[in-house]
Image (cartoon, rainbow, N blue to C red):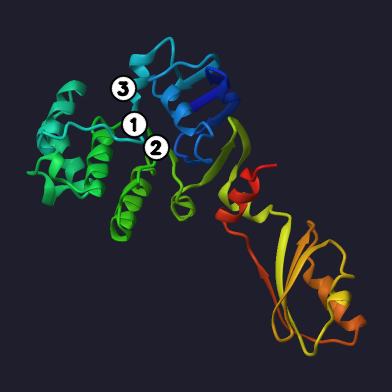
């Protein structure tokens, strides 16, 4: 496994940031790590990158324990922190040269990551002169500089405009072909576009860990839009089994929400026939990741 986490717990005073968190990530996976603010995402990433230590449990990256062999972990991980600390008085290339020297990386690699992250037009500027989006690119270039096996990216697309989002998304997808990528973001579209798998954390505990396609297809809540050939009363609609909510959106069109694993479209056909109705339109609306996220992290 590229990343192995077993029963990790971490507290800040009375606040428990992580509560017996466990999961593993295989080599080559691109995993989206999601959760509300304060859920424990950044804390876990800092543990995996050896910036802080856990109170309980064990974690390893590429088989190296984060406590017993931190240097090996640091060499095998490329880390883009949430707040992306940079030396603003250094030029872009100068900053990358500094980091290349730390990692004993050949100068040719600097040119590679500059091109890879789209920094070529800005490489002769001071970092302090760059937009927030380009500063993110510098952070990503630094994370890639020593060609690590694992990338841990905390909010990598913060501050990017729509065009930059697409470019950086493609960079992450391309490097993910040969590396393990573990990233957090609040942009659900990025997860849907990049990730193979989703882990959702809430109040320090894992609440979901599934392949992205499986997560969407496993949702038991169904939203069906149906149009009948004539008016239908709320009382009649209310007789449908497993119905949790309904809304008459326009004319004879209803949006019906069911809580069941059974496909309710056939039941709606039967309902229409039994009540002398015809269905003119019947559409199953799939839930997107944002809706699933809200359900999984809603305050109970």
Q: Is residue 135 above or below residue 81?
A: below
Mark 3 and 2 residues: CB-CB less than 8 Å, in contact?
no
Q: Position of residue 254 (x, y in %)?
A: 73, 77
Q: Quadrant of the C terminus?
A: top right
Vertical order, 59 against 297 (above or below): above
Asked if the residue at tag 1 contacts the one at tag 2, i.e. Cβ–Cβ closer than 8 Å, the answer is: yes
Question: Is there any visible trace of residue 2 in the rendered image?
Answer: no
- Which disc, if any, is residue 79? 1
Camera sees residue 134: yes
Give the quadrant of residue 145.
Answer: top left
Element marked by disc 2: strand
Provide the residue designation for mark 3: 75
Please tell me which residue is depicted at 44% across the width and 44% down the height of the picture.
185
Circle 1/circle 3 CB separation < 8 Å: no
Residue drawn at (33%, 57%) of the image: 166
Is disc 1 placed on a helix, strand or loop?
strand
Locate residue 74, reporting x and y percent: 33, 21
Compare residues 42 and 74 and report the one nearer the observer.
42
For mark 2, what is the residue?
A: 154
Distance from disc 3 to disc 2, alpha carbons, whole Å, reads: 18 Å
Label 1 Cα neighbours within 10 Å, binned few <14 / some 14-19 / many ≥20: many
Upstream in the sequence, badge 2 or badge 1? 1
Residue located 31% across and 22% down the image? 75
């Amino acid at each position: 496994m590229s990343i192995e986490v077993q029963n990790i717990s971490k507290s800040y005073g009375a606040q428990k940031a992580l509560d017996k968190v466990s999961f593993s990530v295989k080599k080559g996976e691109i995993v989206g790590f999601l959760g509300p603010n304060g859920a424990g995402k950044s804390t876990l990433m800092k543990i995996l990158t050896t910036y802080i230590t856990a109170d309980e449990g064990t974690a390893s990256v590429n088989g190296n324990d984060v406590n017993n062999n931190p240097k090996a972990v640091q060499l095998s991980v490329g880390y883009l922190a949430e707040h992306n600390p940079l030396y603003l008085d250094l030029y872009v290339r100068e900053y990358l040269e500094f980091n290349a020297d730390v990692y004993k990386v050949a100068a040719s690699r600097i040119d590679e990551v500059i091109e890879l992250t789209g920094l070529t037009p800005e490489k002769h500027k001071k970092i302090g002169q760059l937009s927030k989006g380009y500063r993110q690119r510098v952070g990503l270039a630094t994370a890639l500089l020593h060609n690590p096996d694992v990338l841990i990216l905390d909010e990598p697309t913060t501050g990017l405009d729509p065009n930059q989002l697409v470019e950086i998304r493609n960079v992450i997808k391309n490097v993910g072909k040969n590396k393990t990528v573990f990233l957090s973001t609040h942009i659900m579209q990025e997860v849907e576009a990049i990730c193979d798998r989703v882990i959702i954390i809430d109040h320090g505990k894992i609440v979901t860990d599934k392949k992205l396609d499986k997560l969407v297809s496993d949702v038991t809540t169904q939203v069906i839009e149906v149009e009948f050939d004539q008016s239908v009363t709320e009382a009649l609609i209310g007789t449908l089994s497993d119905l949790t909510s309904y809304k008459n959106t326009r004319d004879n069109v209803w949006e019906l929400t069911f809580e069941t694993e059974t496909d309710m479209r056939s039941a709606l056909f039967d309902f229409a026939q039994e009540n002398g109705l015809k269905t003119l339109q019947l559409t199953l609306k799939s839930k997107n990741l944002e809706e699933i996220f809200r359900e999984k992290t809603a305050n109970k």
